[in-house]
Image (spheres, helix red, strand yellow):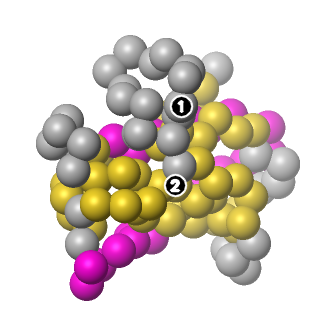
Amino acid sequence: MVRGALNNRYPSHDWNFEGHAGDRVIITMIDASGAGLLNPQLILRTLDGTEIVVSDDIGTIQVEGLSPRDARIDYTLAEDGLFIIAAGRFGGRGDYILTVELAQ
């Protein structure tokens, strides 16, 4: 788990992790305020910058502890390598919490 803050000067932060083909990763980014000040957006990229998947809102999916505007990626990696998580915002500004889980 990491925490950060996004604003007009810093609209996105990049975080890296190493993964292996077949790993199922769940990446979640929430507005730490719980007040809707930040609309999180996640982008998962390969090391060369190729976008794999983007998530702006979880929408109508009910996930305990998450609001509809929080972002979540549930993805099975196709190859080994270093991956980049761009923790950004679709709107607003504020503090966020980012988690990465290896699912079974």
Q: Earlier in the sequence, mark 2 or mark 1?
A: 2
Give the alpha-carbon distance from disc 2 to disc 1, as whole Å.
Answer: 14 Å
What amino acid type is highlighted by mark number 2?
A: Leu
In this figure, what is the number of numbered marks?
Answer: 2
Residue at 19% of width from left, 58% of height from top?
94
Q: Which residues are magenta?
A: 8-30
Direction from residue 82 to residue 72 in the image, left or right: left
Q: Nearer the viewer, residue 92 or 52?
A: 92
**What residue is pinned by disc 1?**
59
Residue at 53% of width from left, 49% of height from top?
56
Instruction: Tell me the element at label 2.
Output: strand
Q: Is residue 86 above or below residue 34?
A: below
Q: Quadrant of the N terminus?
A: top left
Q: Specify few, some or many for label 1: CA neighbours under 10 Å numbering under 14, 14-19, or 20 or more.
A: some
**What residue is pinned by disc 2?**
42
What amino acid type is highlighted by mark number 1?
A: Gly
Residue at 60% of width from left, 26% of height from top?
103
Q: Specify few, some or many for label 2: CA neighbours under 10 Å numbering under 14, 14-19, or 20 or more.
A: many
One can see residue 96 in this view: no
Location of residue 43 in the rendering, given as x and y in whole percent from the top left corner: 58, 59
Q: Quadrant of the C terminus?
A: top right
Task: Determine the main secondary structure of the stretch shown in magenta.
Answer: strand
Locate residue 102: give its quadrant: top right
- Residue 76: give its label: none
Q: Nearer the viewer, residue 53 or 17?
A: 53
One can see residue 80 in this view: yes
Which numbered mark, 2 or 1, is in the foreground of this view?
1
Residue farthest right in this picture: 78
Location of residue 10 in the rendering, given as x and y in whole percent from the top left corner: 29, 78
Q: Is residue 2 above or below residue 15?
A: above
Residue at 41% of width from left, 39% of height from top?
69
Instruction: Tell me the element at label 1.
Output: loop
